[in-house]
Image: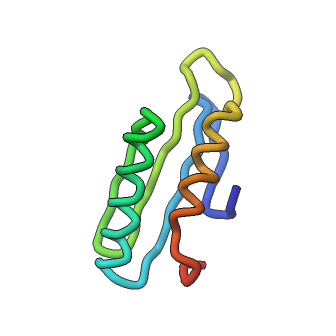
Amino acid sequence: MSDHWKVRKRPARLEGRFEFESYDDTRDFLDLAAELAEREDYYPDMSFGRTHVSITLKSEEEESEVNENIKRYAEMLDELVPPSVP
């Protein structure tokens, strides 16, 4: 899992923010993230602006820590980010 992600508690979740160089890069990432959500049947909370995307991945409410499925999903999102993004 990349440095884009921060572990939060109460409720257990991962929060990530990705900065892009252009709107087109942001849009490409959002399109790929939408395909991933459909394929995995998991729909994270996302907000975005012209050149950034913020994502929250939540564990089940009763869990006190981020579960392995959420960490795996974060890794799959990381793979969608272009190499030029720090």
Occupied quadrant, residue 41: top left
Q: Quadrant of residue 78?
A: bottom right
Residue at 54% in and 78% down: 85
Give the percent coordinates (x, y) of residue 8: 63, 41
Q: Which residue is drawn at 29% across and 78% down?
A: 23
Q: In this view, does 32 lie to the left or right of 79?
A: left
Q: Where is residue 40 in the image (x, y as percent from the top left)?
A: 47, 37
How many dots with numbers? 0
Residue 86 placed where, x, y %? 60, 78
Residue placed at 44% from the left, 48% from the top?
Answer: 36
Against 20, residue 31 (above or below) is above
- Which sits in the foreground, 70 or 7? 70
* Residue 23 located left or right of residue 29: left
Q: How is the image coloured?
A: rainbow
The residue that appears at 70% across and 34% down in the rendered structure is: 68
Q: Quadrant of the N terminus?
A: bottom right
Q: Is residue 55 left or right of residue 69?
A: left
Q: In this view, does 47 lie above or below 73?
A: below
Tell which residue pokes out farthest to the front in this image. 39
Say left or right for 31 vs 83. left
Residue 70: percent from left, percent from top: 61, 38
